[in-house]
Structure formats: structure tokens, C-alpha cells
Image (tube, rainbow, N blue to C red):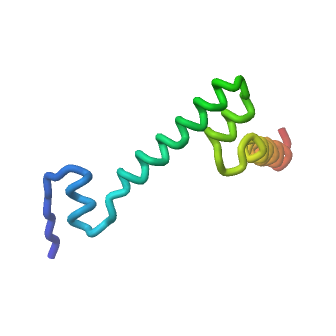
């Protein structure tokens, strides 16, 4: 037997129905903090500080590591295919 139930609700209503927490206030606070850090770095004319504010988990180094990982993967695929 197959039963389909269709419910018309907003994402907020669906989260409440499933018992998931409302993370909107946390997201709003984090966004405000990030904007304040970026504005402070922008006002100080500090591009590296802006990148750290924009990417708090590792800053520019994390982006460079990600970029290197992508490049290494592409290089390995080319070597594997012999092209």
C-alpha cells in the first residue's frame, strides 16, 4: 500500500512541525557580526582583514588550500587519462 500526504506550509512551519530549531536569530546575529567585521576592515583599508571576516574558518589560507586541492585533483585526472 502506498500513501501520499501533501502538506502546504512555509519552511518555518515545516521546521516547527518536524521539531527542528529556529536558527533564523542565530543566522541574523552571525550575519550582523560578519558585516561589522567586514566594515571595520574596509574602513581600515585592510583587504586581508576583509577576507578573514568573510571567511572566518581559515581566511585566505583556507581558500588557497581549497584551490590547491582542486588543482591537484584536476592534474591527477589528466595524468590518469593520459591527456
What is the x, y in percent for residue 37? 60, 37
Q: Quadrant of residue 74?
A: top right
Q: Is residue 17 left or right of residue 43?
A: left
Tell which residue pokes out farthest to the bottom in this image: 1
> Against 71, is 48 above or below?
above
Q: Quadrant of residue 38?
A: top right
Whether residue 77 can be seen here:
no
Which residue is drawn at the image coordinates 71% and 44% (left, top)?
59
> Against 39, is 11 above or below?
below
Task: State the count of labels.
Answer: 0
Quadrant containing the C terminus in the rendered view: top right
Which residue is drawn at the image coordinates 16% and 71% (left, top)?
2
Q: Closer to the camera, 67 or 3?
A: 67
Q: Closer to the camera, 41 or 3?
A: 41
What is the x, y in percent for residue 27? 43, 49
Whether residue 33 can be seen here:
yes
Q: Is residue 42 left or right of residue 1?
A: right
Q: Is residue 56 left or right of residue 18?
A: right
What is the x, y in percent for residue 78? 81, 42
Which residue is drawn at the image coordinates 15% and 76% (left, top)?
1
What is the x, y in percent for residue 47? 72, 28
Which residue is drawn at the image coordinates 47% and 40% (left, top)?
32
Amino acid at each position: 500500500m502506498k500513501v501520499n500526504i501533501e502538506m502546504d506550509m512555509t519552511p518555518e512551519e515545516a521546521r516547527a512541525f518536524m521539531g527542528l530549531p529556529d536558527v533564523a536569530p542565530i543566522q541574523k546575529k552571525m550575519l550582523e557580526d560578519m558585516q561589522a567585521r567586514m566594515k571595520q576592515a574596509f574602513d581600515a583599508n585592510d583587504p586581508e582583514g576583509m577576507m578573514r571576516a568573510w571567511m572566518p574558518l581559515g581566511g585566505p589560507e583556507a581558500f588557497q588550500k581549497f584551490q590547491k586541492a582542486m588543482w591537484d585533483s584536476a592534474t591527477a585526472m589528466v595524468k590518469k587519462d593520459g591527456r
